[in-house]
Image (cartoon, grey):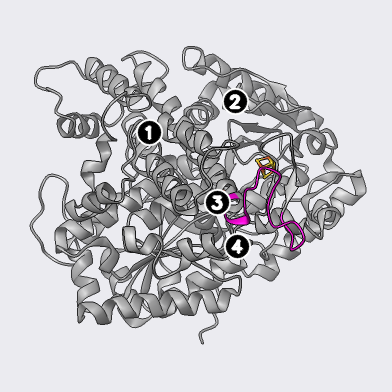
Amino acid sequence: MKDWAFTTTIEEMEAATNSLLETAQKVGADTWQQRVKNQTPHCGFGESGTCCRICSMGPCRITKKAPRGICGCDVHGIVGRNFLMFTAGGAATHSDHGREICHTLYQTKPDGNYTVKDPEKLIRIAKEWGVETEGKDIYDLAHEIAEMALLEYGKPFGTQRFLKRAPEHTQKLWHDAEIEPRAIDREVSQSLHMSHMGCSSLPEALVRQALRAGLSDGWGGSMAGTEFSDVLFGTPKPIDTEANIGVMEKDNVNIVVHGHDPSLSEMIVYYANDPEMIAYAKSMGAKGITVSGVCCTSNEVAMRHGIPMAGNYLNQENVVLTGACEAIVVDVQCIFPALGPLSKCFHTKFITTSPIARIPDSEFIRFSSATAGDNAKAIVKMAIENFKNRKPELVNIPNLKQKARVGYSVEAIVKVLDGVANSQVDEFGTTKPLLECVTSGVLRGAVAMVGCNNPKVRPDSAHIGLMKKMLENDIIVITTGCAAQAAAKAGLMDPEKAKEYCGAGLKRVCELAGIPPVLHMGSCVDISRMMILAAELSKDSGIPISQLPVVGCAPEWMSEKAVSIGNYVVATGIETFLGVDPYVKGSSEICELLTGEHGVKDWVEAKYVVDTDIESLGDKMIACIEAKRAALGI
Ligand code: XCC
Ligand code: SF4
């Protein structure tokens, strides 16, 4: 075992957090660490999924003495309905984010707040959708495509356009299993219809719809979110940045962006770099302005502008606890309501911007694409003017940060790996060099590591521990979301240092391609990038996705979105390993469908593996990859 000497350890991160918790105690602030204690132990019925409260005859809880709810629903129906509703919540959330991006695309103007930054990608998508592009003004085309994309949410007939990107084999599996997603909103709606009192209680039907709703997210709403964010803000390319709480700067005005929708954070970044604003900050006694991020919006602006990442999900209170955060500006999703009361203990302005995420004890500056520039300017100004209100005795920015190279869109991965082998490149490029590395055994395979933090797992320990294990075994890691930030914080995305600890094959690939062994692919909607990569690998090799030595893993997940993701990753044919149980252990039938050899596996050639012992989860992932290699005879 190598010692990974240069990486930031979990212990160091915890020590930094502990020093911030001392400040919390001083100012009488409440933190998640305390609230976890108040909430423990958790309700056993909720945890096993066996509580039903979808009609007012209940709530019903399933026990030995009471094996059925008042309507007669058994435990499998209740657990299955809960699982489906959980998925629908996630699919709705990702897809509605995607819809907002489509609306932003519809608002683009050559001299507007939002413009088309990647016209080539727009044209590529237009051609894919059979739209005439010749001689068309790029903004007319943007509006036409935006409208078509918006119609994907409610089209009365047909299935999602992006499904055609999948290999034929996968498309056929979806068709045969009757899980091809139709209109995105329809799948969310139908899920809630099926889970209504007195509708579906047959486990198989509920799980099938959960896969379908998941697919409407991954190959529908999330894919739209990713693709059109690239068109609007540029397709990510490798770029250097830094990560961990130490990216905040004591002498600067610190603005932290948090949430998911880049329409807000892009504008904040733009105005924070405005010379006029920097001069204003200086006139207020600061040396400059630092924008950093938490959660996925941080990933978005890191991937496109190299904006540093202050932390991931369970670090969101830490940025306020530094006492040096002038403003935490949020849009949607994964925002602790706790930030309201917490910010009141400091000088920090907690600024909400979306009608979708209204939170008590925040200042609401409604952000819209028509007024985005003015809104962002007002927010940056507010932060600057707040600098003087800092309490110097509370300022503590733990000195932890690591270098990270991020920005690995599929386009970027194809491009950098082209340096490793010489293959023919078509318009999009090809994944053949990557395939050669895998078939020759230089790389054993790939893991897509995704998802959140969850206090049920020592924060980041599973992400970082599993990633190190994969790298030592010559398995390349692609990652998004808070898992990606965990890697960056630890130093696993430092292209100079991280390769030293990899197996010899992976190290060589990193050297030849100039990449870190853990590739940051973006935010959680960008897991759609991973689906495209898997599809391309399959089409370029002629091997079905399910037979490629590739697995998915969410060791610390927590959100409904994560379950929706899990469902589409599995439905795409990728075995998915979870480190936290998705509230299904109360039903043997639902467990069998999700994790057995003859449930979803029969329909889509992949299943879930749940193991809360992280060491053993990692061993199972490696065994799965090796078994797939053996089956292919490579
Ligand atoms: Fe949220 Fe996307 Fe999870 Fe992180 S990984 S806690 S969902 S920010 Ni998506
Ligand atoms: Fe109880 Fe059935 Fe109503 Fe659920 S739907 S709360 S199980 S009576």
Foreground: disc 1 or disc 2: 2
For ligand 2, give the image quadrant.
Answer: top right
* Mark 1, other Cα within 10 Å: few <14 / some 14–19 / many ≥20: many
Q: Earlier in the sequence, mark 1 or mark 2?
A: 1
Residue matched to label 3: 80
Residue matched to label 1: 229
Q: Residue 27: which quarter of the image?
A: top right
Report helix, strand or loop for mark 2.
loop
Q: Earlier in the sequence, mark 1 or mark 4?
A: 1
Labels 2 and 3 touching (C-beta < 8 A): no
Question: Is 256 rendered above or below residue 23?
Answer: above
* Mark 4, other Cα within 10 Å: few <14 / some 14–19 / many ≥20: some
Residue 515 location in percent, x, y? 34, 62
Residue reaching furthest to the bottom:
1
Residue type highlighted by circle 4: Val
From the Cβ of disc 1, is ligand 1 less than 8 Å away? no
Question: Is 138 rendered above or below residue 466?
Answer: above
Residue type highlighted by circle 1: Ser
| Residue 288 marker | none
Q: Which residues are magenta?
A: 62-77
Viewer can see residue 4: no
Measure how far apart labels 1 and 4 are at the Cα level.
30 Å
